[in-house]
């Protein structure tokens, strides 16, 4: 039986492109006929449904949290949105948007109209044994994720390492993908975050993979690699803003940029990078620059 893998996406700050990169990664795997469950665990910025105009109709992670905080731990199965569910719940305009979502990707995300006050308090910080509760909850939540029939479970984590799910899900993940942009302040903050996390759990170091997002084609790949040890550099996509306004989840440029990362994770895919004309991509993949 093939082992399911949990791959968590993390950024130490907002506006690093975490949502777009994690969705592109999921779509890339789905293009290769892998089944993917995309799980939104960032309760601070629950934006996936809004960005994709997904109507959850009660099949969402917030409804799951509401049920499990009442003392009844259940399977996530009935709260997952398949591609068929998404299409059935949308109008004609929204169905055109959904064409950008691969059919093999399912979602366990927050509803579109979610507000901060609607997210249930999963932790009673005034109670005793808070840490024990968190460990137990995340353990059981992870178990029910792995019970589902998917090849990969892709989790979008919160920026805050103290968030209930962030650090604990990192420990349960097979791989951690950290996304950052080529800003000196962001890169320094990235190094500090890695140092702190690795001190807390040395095993995270072997799971960690850095992605440099929104890189300039004018800068040699070797210069970027001197700042961040990574094989995955995603060029700045000048078309991305237009695609974002058109509610497209990602782009072919970003998906193709992620192919090297997927290969580094030991996942077999049909590489399409040779068809990409981006000079930066060619430099990164060939080791030049």
Image: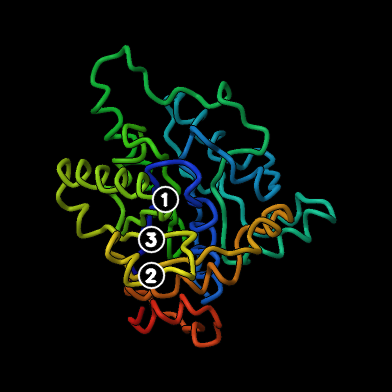
Relative placement, left or right, of 37 versus 245 is left
Q: Quickly name the residue at label 2.
A: 261
Q: Quickly name the residue at label 3.
A: 211
Q: Which of disc 3 and disc 1 is earlier in sequence?
A: 1
Label 1 element class: helix
Q: Which of disc 2 and disc 3 is earlier in sequence?
A: 3
**On-image quarter of the C terminus:** bottom left
Position in image of residue 226 (x %, y %): 27, 64
Cβ–Cβ under 8 Å for marks 1 and 2: no
Position in image of residue 125 (x %, y %): 33, 17
Q: Quickly name the residue at label 1.
A: 145
Position in image of residue 273 (x %, y %): 49, 82
**Alpha-carbon distance for marks 3 and 2?**
8 Å
Report which quarter residue 129 is drawn in.
top left
**Alpha-carbon distance for marks 1 and 2?**
23 Å
Position in image of residue 46 (x %, y %): 55, 38
Relative placement, left or right, of 98 versus 205 is right
Cβ–Cβ under 8 Å for marks 3 and 2: yes
Residue nearer the viewer, 79 or 275 = 275
Q: Is residue 159 above or below residue 284?
A: above
As drawn, which residue projects farthest toward the right? Answer: 92
At label 2, counting other C-alpha atoms closer than 10 Å, the crowd grade (few under 14, some 14-19, many 20 or more) is many
Report which quarter residue 237 is drawn in.
bottom right
Label 2 element class: helix
Residue nearer the viewer, 4 or 279 = 279
Mark toward the viewer: 3 or 2? 3
């Amino acid at each position: 039986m093939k082992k399911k893998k949990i791959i968590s996406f993390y950024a130490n700050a907002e506006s690093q492109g975490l949502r777009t990169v994690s969705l592109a990664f999921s779509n890339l795997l789905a293009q290769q006929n892998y089944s993917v469950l995309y799980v939104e665990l960032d309760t601070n910025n629950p934006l996936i449904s809004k960005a994709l105009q997904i109507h959850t109709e009660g099949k969402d992670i917030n409804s799951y949290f509401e049920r499990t905080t009442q003392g009844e731990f259940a399977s996530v199965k009935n709260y997952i949105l398949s591609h068929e569910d998404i299409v059935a719940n949308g109008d004609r305009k929204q169905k055109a948007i959904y064409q950008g979502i691969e059919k093999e990707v399912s979602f366990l995300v927050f509803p579109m109209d979610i507000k901060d006050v609607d997210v249930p308090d999963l932790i009673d910080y005034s109670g005793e044994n808070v840490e024990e509760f968190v460990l137990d909850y995340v353990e059981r939540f992870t178990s029910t994720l792995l019970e589902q029939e998917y090849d990969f479970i892709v989790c979008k984590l919160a920026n805050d390492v103290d968030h209930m799910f962030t650090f604990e899900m990192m420990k349960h993940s097979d791989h951690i993908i950290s996304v950052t942009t080529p800003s000196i302040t962001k890169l320094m903050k990235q190094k500090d975050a890695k140092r702190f996390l690795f001190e807390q759990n040395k095993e995270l170091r072997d799971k960690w993979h850095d992605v440099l997002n929104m890189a300039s084609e004018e800068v040699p790949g070797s210069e970027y690699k001197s700042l961040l040890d990574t094989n995955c550099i995603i060029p700045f996509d000048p078309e991305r803003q237009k695609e974002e306004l058109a509610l497209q989840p990602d782009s072919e440029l970003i998906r193709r940029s992620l192919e090297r990362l997927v290969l580094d994770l030991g996942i077999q895919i049909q590489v399409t990078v040779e068809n990409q004309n981006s000079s930066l991509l060619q430099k990164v993949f060939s080791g030049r620059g």
